[in-house]
Image (cartoon, rainbow, N blue to C red):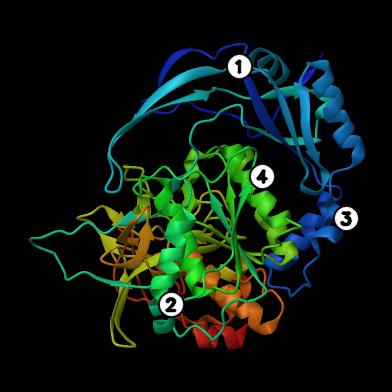
Amino acid sequence: MTRYTLAGSERRAVAGARRLAAAEPTQQLEVLLVLRHGDPTALQALGARLAAGERIAPLTREAYAARFGAHADDVAAVAAFARQYELTLVRADPARCVVVLAGTVARLQAAFGVELHTFELTQAPTASESARTQRYRGRIGHITLPDALREIVTAVLGLDNRPQARTHFRFHRPRAGAGATQAVSYTPPQVAALYQFPDGDGSGQCIGLIELGGGYRPTDLTRYFAQLDIPAPKVVAVSVDGASNQPSGNADGPDGEVVLDIEVAGSIAPGAQIAVYFAANTDAGFIDAVSQAIHDTVNRPSVVSISWGGPESSWTAQATQSFNQVLQEAAVLGVTVCVAAGDGGASDGTGSSTLEVDFPASSPYALACGGTRLRASGSTIVSEVVWNDGAQGGATGGGISTAFALPSWQQGLQATNLEGTKVPLNGRGVPDVAGNADPETGYAVWVDGSATVVGGTSAVAPLWAGLIARINAKQAKPIGYVNPILYEHSAACRPIVQGNNGGYEASIGWNACAGLGSPNGEVLGADL
């Protein structure tokens, strides 16, 4: 049988990972296959028009499924492939162009032309996490498929289950000595007031949150919102591929991310429903969670917040392309997607001298959210600079993408390097906007039974999501793909002109540390 190599599917060995043994042949696995769209040319043209700044009425989820869902013949071809290799078709979702197959390691290896092994990797300690050793199932090389599936299947995800993303939050750690400053904290509504968010509570909207582990305890949320004297929003947990709300009791782990997202978004837009999509921390889980949120016909989020990500270089090309396609679908459906730009500075925490940006924040269809250090006196902002805390190892992500071309709405922009030299953008610039993120000026939250202060760009994505939910509720329709509009109305943001992220300096206008700046909520609401 003639087979072909699936473009973009190559997995390289992870530096420092040790191969332990072949994967157990009888182990049962599930894999996610992404199929081509029903009319891919028309969909790409629609996405290009949106990216060029054209105002297009969003499609309903039902209309999208009818026009761009996978063809029945393509799903049938995948079903025939599954039967040939004795795999089980777990589910087919033509509207989202995905099929899930299950089988043993042995049968999946034969079906996809791969060899699976168990690897062990010890990750060095960071400012927010101690050193830890992880074992994962991995592969090296390309995936191959029978010629009958050529052009039908665009990605095969889930054979490799290494952790794909990391959280972008950091707890405040008191410090002393040179460089120490007086720490302060704010509640999310206080930050919203400083940024002059328009009145409203997001009633009638749904904010989707993507979480790749951990969970929340309803008692924590009840206590938190009661302390703020804010009506608690309705929070629903949505399972993706069997994952669920599972709080570990460890605030330093994913629980901190989950609860931070809920408490920030929920306290800014308490009238909105908060739908929390729980998935496994793999490329398949991450992409499937965002796809499910975007196409959810029950909860119908109008804005989605993502506080997870990883360096562009850590993603396969097929995963990057599939994820970007889902974010383009969000734009077509009128769903705004806010994504944290990362907490590892201009190198994105890779530990190398190479400058790199975080994905999915670097997608041109994501609203990339960077971080600042915000200080106020009463109801007035006294100063706001780029968040960069070298002593604790945290700094806002930002820079120039090597995976995505320069969008039309960023044409002519420049980044300023640490030497003060202007560098024309030759790729997608990150971030687009910013907001308070420094743990030393962080957010007062309640996690796993304790009050604490948290920062990181993880807080900025749900902050912006809450703002957009308020605006959507006020105008009774979603603003959707907001990037071209923001660059057209840059006065809707407060420019951040001081500080650096270890690779780029802030400057007047857009910069690769804080983007267009932090929100000027009243102006933003009026302009949108």
**Image marks 1 and 4: residues in contact by CB distance under 8 Å:** no
| 377 vs 345, nearest the viewer | 377
Residue type at tag 2: Asp
Quote the CA–CA distance across marks 1 and 4: 27 Å
Residue type at tag 3: Arg
Residue 25 in view here: yes
Badge 4 is on which residue?
Answer: 322
The quarter of the rendered structure image containing the N terminus is top right
- Identify the residue shown where x is 82% and y is 23%: 81
Q: What secondary structure is marked by label 4?
A: helix
Pick whichever of labels 2 and 4 is earlier in the sequence: 2
Badge 1 is on which residue?
Answer: 27
The percent coordinates of residue 362 (x first, y second) are 53, 55
| 394 vs 15, nearest the viewer | 394
Name the side, left or right, on which 207 lies relative to 65: left
Quote the CA–CA distance across marks 3 and 2: 46 Å
Quote the CA–CA distance across marks 2 and 1: 50 Å
Pointer 1: residues within 10 angstroms few (<14), some, or many (20+)? few
Residue type at tag 1: Gln
Q: What secondary structure is marked by label 1?
A: loop
Name the side, left or right, on which 16 lies relative to 510: left
The percent coordinates of residue 83 (x first, y second) are 83, 19
Q: Nearer the viewer, mark 3 or mark 1?
A: 1
